[in-house]
Image (spheres, rainbow, N blue to C red):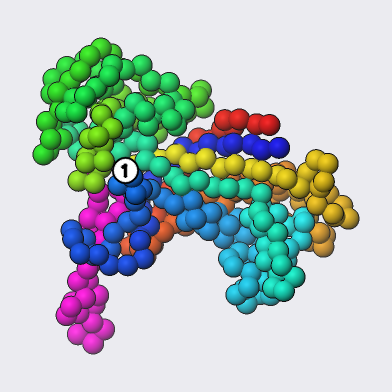
């Protein structure tokens, strides 16, 4: 059996998920992008690693965070009733290990904040909104055109270097009832701008946050020579969406061989857990919730990385 849980996320800080090296061009430290669209994303591996580490903190199972083979606390416990090992998998040296029961997909861009002469707007495309589960009523737009939820707006829209032409009738965007009531959604619902897919990546990549930093020489207290570097990030107030699939193959006709089923409050050794859990999705959400406070990705000491869960819901279940 499986459950597909969808998460709508919003960045509270700039987010930098680096490519792991330098490049020649506009910035020294670039961020991860989709190869086909050149759009920034947050890899599922980054979300999964943060979710596991933070969930281990919540459930007081720190030894089960991170790679088991290099864990100084003795490696993963590997117990069937451990929420971390059961959810994310475990490695126990020569004894092998077990795969996890969840798969966290890449977080893709949904709404991208851009400054305009009418204030901040959130840019997206009809196809991207529909793919994330929104119901969109909007006219078809071509390159250089836009449709918007800005009330009574029928004039061209200036995005600084780009002037877009209005197209068509009223545009409406709706999602599940849980999102309609969220304060964060109400703040952007009437400031959406939908453009053609071919233009979206150009708008995004020209409006990423770019910062310059320099190392400080501890002896002089001044900037260190040759230590200037430029890096980019997904800006604050960007909306993303990600799917989490729970594939709990250990239940049903061939469950994991355990002496007792987990009760949600204790591990296999009878130790009380810091949180209760009923299924692996509970564990994932407990970890992702802490990303709002502890962040994900690089540049954390520079105020980067916090992401907030706006809403989540089950898309399908079998």
The answer to whether residue 291 is visible is no
Query: Relative to residue 163, is residue 243 drawn left or right?
Result: right
Image quarter for residue 239?
top left
The picture places residue 222, in percent across and down from the top left corner, at: 18, 79
Query: Relative to residue 207, is residue 67 drawn left or right?
Result: right
- In the rendered image, the quadrant that contains the C terminus is top right
Give above or below for 140 relative to 133: above
Query: Relative to residue 285, is residue 242 drawn left or right?
Result: left
Image quarter for residue 192?
top left
Give above or below for 196 relative to 107: above
Q: Residue at x 37, y 40 (%)?
A: 109
Tag count: 1
Please identify the dominant SS of the magenta region: strand
The answer to whether residue 77 is visible is yes
Assess whether residue 93 is covered by the magenta stretch: no
- Residue at the far bottom: name it: 219
- Residue at the far front: name it: 36
Mark 1 residue crowding within 10 angstroms, few (<14) / some (14–19) / many (20+): few
Q: Residue at x 47, y 56 (%)?
A: 46
The residue lying toward the viewer, choosing from 150 and 170, is 170
Q: Residue at x 21, y 61 (%)?
A: 27
The picture places residue 86, in percent across and down from the top left corner, at: 70, 54
The picture places residue 127, in percent across and down from the top left corner, at: 36, 28
Which residue is identified by label 1?
37
Q: Residue at x 34, y 42 (%)?
A: 238
The picture places residue 82, in percent across and down from the top left corner, at: 73, 57
Q: Which element is circle 1 on? A: loop
Assess whether residue 221 is covered by the magenta stretch: yes
Q: Which residues are magenta?
A: 207-236
- In the rendered image, the quadrant that contains the N terminus is top right
- Residue at the far top: name it: 169
């Amino acid at each position: 059996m499986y459950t597909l849980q969808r998460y709508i996320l919003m960045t509270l800080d700039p987010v930098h998920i680096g490519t792991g090296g330098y490049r020649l061009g506009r910035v020294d430290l670039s961020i991860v992008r989709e190869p086909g669209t050149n759009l920034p994303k947050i890899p599922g591996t980054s979300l999964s690693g943060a979710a596991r580490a933070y969930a281990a903190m919540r459930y007081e199972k720190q030894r089960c965070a991170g790679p088991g083979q290099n864990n100084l606390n003795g490696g993963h416990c590997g117990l069937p009733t451990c929420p971390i090992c059961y959810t994310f998998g475990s490695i126990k040296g020569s004894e092998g290990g077990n795969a996890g029961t969840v798969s966290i997909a890449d977080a893709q861009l949904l709404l991208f904040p851009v400054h305009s002469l009418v204030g901040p707007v959130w840019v997206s495309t009809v196809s991207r909104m529909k793919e994330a589960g929104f119901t969109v009523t909007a006219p078809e737009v071509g390159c250089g055109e836009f449709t918007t939820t800005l009330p009574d707006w029928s004039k061209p829209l200036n995005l600084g270097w780009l002037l877009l032409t209005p197209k068509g009738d009223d545009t409406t965007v709706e999602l599940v009832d849980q999102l309609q009531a969220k304060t964060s959604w109400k703040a952007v619902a009437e400031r959406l701008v939908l453009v053609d897919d071919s233009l979206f990546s150009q708008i995004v990549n020209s409006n990423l946050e770019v910062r310059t930093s320099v190392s400080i020489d501890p002896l002089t207290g001044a900037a260190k020579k040759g230590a200037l570097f430029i890096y980019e990030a997904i800006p604050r107030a960007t909306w993303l969406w990600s799917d989490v699939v729970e594939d709990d193959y250990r239940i049903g006709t061939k469950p994991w061989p355990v002496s007792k089923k987990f009760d949600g409050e204790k591990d296999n050794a009878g130790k009380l857990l810091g949180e209760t859990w009923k299924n692996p999705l509970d564990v994932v959400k407990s970890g992702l919730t802490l990303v709002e406070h502890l962040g994900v990705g690089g540049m954390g000491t520079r105020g980067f990385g916090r992401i907030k869960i706006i809403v989540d819901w089950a898309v399908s279940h079998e």
